[in-house]
Image (tube, rainbow, N blue to C red):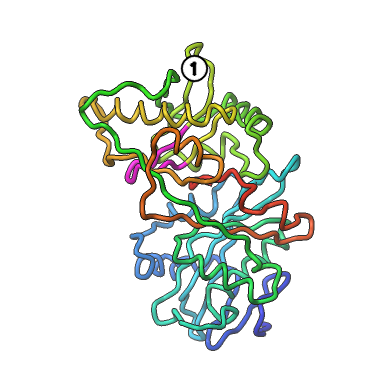
Amino acid sequence: MPTGHRAPSTGHRAVMAEQLTYRIMQTGDLPGVLRLWRDEAGWGDLTPEVWKTWFEDGPCGPSILAVAVTDGGDIVGQIALNPAELAVGDRTVRAVRIAAPIIERRHRIDTPVIGKHPATLMYLTAVAEAQRRGFSVAYALPERTWLAFFLGGRRLGNSLTNFGTAEYACMSYPLAGLESRAPLTKFRAHQMEDFGTEHEALWRDAREELPIICSIVPSRDWKNYRSSAHLTLDVRDAQARLRGYAVVRRKSGLLHDLLACSANDLGEVLGATVDWLEEKQRDTSGETLSFQALNVMASPALRGPLERLAFQPTDFRFAFACVPIDESVAPAEIAPDRWFVMPGN
């Protein structure tokens, strides 16, 4: 197995840093990776069946996973690149979302040299494979504590780690509980089961009308895959025309995803979502909401509508990072302020 101190530029070559080897995950690594999730991630057990759903059966193809391995063959780190389609201007490119970085506690190093960090070397190993498979952009919506990692990558002099970054406030709207108040909009939200062709047509309209310069392409397969565990609403006007949709996480009340057919309708779709949640909160005959407020990542496209609806900032902050990984996409084309981005992307 070839070794060196830098991540490979192509293929499945491995990289050494101290006593760890960095390589693409192999089929026989699954038990070790599942152990890592159970013991180190703090996210609970992950069954082989759920693993397959998350990382092998996605609508845009299987994920790319890199692992860190000891000389004894133990898996002590992993990182995933989950594939998606990304609209960039008037074209569509293949992208990967950086996700699920896990490092065993005894290998979590505090080093000022970001290029020697296991997370960096796993990322570089995985992104080299992504390049080989024809992906053009890597992006992440990490916990804010990881933002220093992405900022530090700029010091490496490597285009693959020269991330553009942004932070967004979390804005919140307390639900009224059993108290009734006037609706925020004349639009009406309705719970739905699945996304369909009508929602794909909405995306095409929104791409022109908002406009959307840079965003994950939400095909119906993508939307159903990413949103099946959450509250999913479509929003219609008085003539029953589809004007947008919203997806809300059941446990936290975080707005997972939202789209409207025009910039003017963004606030209306947000308002209809609040109205539906408050009505749901008052209805004690069905599913009980486990949250008391709608929380929203205040990306540039949503900041104005959120303020007009009197959403209030909280102490929480979201982070975002992105980088081109081939020459077909210029950094300026995917600068963070050009993205229409949601947590569910």
Residue at (56, 64) in percent of width and height: 65
**Where is residue 61 drawn, in percent x and y?**
61, 49
Please tell me whether residue 113 belongs to the stretch shown in magenta: no
Residue 139 falls in which quadrant of the image?
Answer: bottom right
Residue 42 falls in which quadrant of the image?
Answer: bottom left
Residue at (55, 47) in percent of width and height: 58
Residue at (37, 70) in percent of width and height: 40
* Between 209 and 99, the one nearer to me in the picture: 209
Q: Under tag 1, what secondary structure?
A: loop
Residue at (25, 27) in percent of width and height: 286
Q: Quadrant of the N terminus?
A: bottom right
Label 1 neighbour load within 10 Å: few <14, some 14-19, many 20+: some
Badge 1 amino acid: Asp
* Between 95 and 145, the one nearer to me in the picture: 145
User: Farthest right residue?
Assistant: 328
* 44 in relation to 288, above or below: below
**Where is residue 274 drawn, in percent x and y?**
37, 31
Q: In the image, which residues are magenta? A: 246-256
* Between 310 and 87, the one nearer to me in the picture: 310
Task: Identify the residue position indicated by label 1 in the image.
Answer: 237
**Where is residue 316 drawn, in percent x and y?**
38, 55
